[in-house]
Image: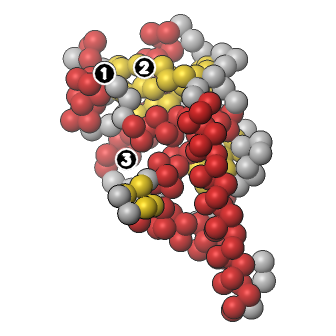
Amino acid sequence: MIEQRTEAWHQARMGKVTASRVADLMAKTKSGPSSSRANYMATLIVERLTGVREEGFTNAAMIWGVDTEPQARAAYEFLTDATVIEEGFVLHQAIPDFGASPDGLVGDVGLLEIKCPQTAAHLDVLLSGEVPGKYVTQMQAQMACTGRAWCDFVSFDPRMPGEMQLFVKRVHRDEVFIAAMEGEIAAFLAELAQKLDALRDRYQVAA
């Protein structure tokens, strides 16, 4: 297993569609695909041309999320009496340029997706009792790559009072959604390959 957020992990993901960005790939407007799809494709094309990964934006909230994730995982294990096995980057069996990095494997058929958001976002989840849509897409993508049957969503904020710190909700594998998603990802990657070939042919750049 390649440990997440290491340089080897970043290299393994470079130029590939990842579960955390599938919502951007699938986003639609009234007139068609959103700009997030085109921007994501441009990022992957540049990564493949240069062999250099795009440096992601990092802020204090993101650092908090990464630093708090082990505490969230431990809280989930205590609540559910489950053992979570950390995982690296898992490639889809049929779409080789598509992969996922789940926050953990649970038993033989489960996954774990952890979010440690700002308190306002955690409150929204507590009040709605629902998993935000963009994370549902991410979790379905993870299940598509790993073949697992369900994924537990965790929102964790240790700054809240005891029973409000941890929210857990299970999302089950949706075969209809996954089939549609895989079709869109395959089409996206085919378009990306065509554009990459066109650029290399026009400017005589070796693959």
Quadrant for the C terminus in the image: bottom right
Q: Position of residue 164 (x, y in %)?
A: 26, 17
User: Are discs 2 and 1 less than 8 Å apart at CB?
Assistant: yes
Name the spot of residue 15 as percent of width and height, x first. Answer: 64, 63
Q: CA distance from mark 2 to mark 1?
A: 8 Å
**Apparent side of residue 86 relative to residue 70 in the rendered image (left or right):** right
Q: In this rendering, which labeled residue sits more in front, label 1 or label 3?
A: 1
Residue 42 visible from this viewpoint = yes
Mark number, residue 190: none
Residue 141 position within the rendered picture, expressed as x and y whole percent measured from the top left: 58, 39
Which class describes the residues within 10 Å of circle 3: few (<14), some (14-19), or many (20+)? some
Q: Which residue is mark 2?
A: 169
Residue for point 54% across, 22% down = 172
Amino acid type of the residue tagged 1 in the rendering: Gly
Q: Which of the two labelled residues, at mark 1 and mark 3, occupies the earlier sequence position?
A: 3
Q: Residues within 10 Å of mark 2 (few under 14, many from 20)?
A: few
Residue 62: mark in rendering: 3
Q: Amino acid at mark 3?
A: Met
**Mark 1, residue position:** 129
Work out how far the residue at label 3 is from the one at label 2, CA to CA, in angstroms.
Answer: 22 Å
The outermost residue toward the bottom is 203
Q: Measured from the top left, where is residue 120 in percent x and y?
A: 21, 35
Cα separation between marks 1 and 3: 23 Å
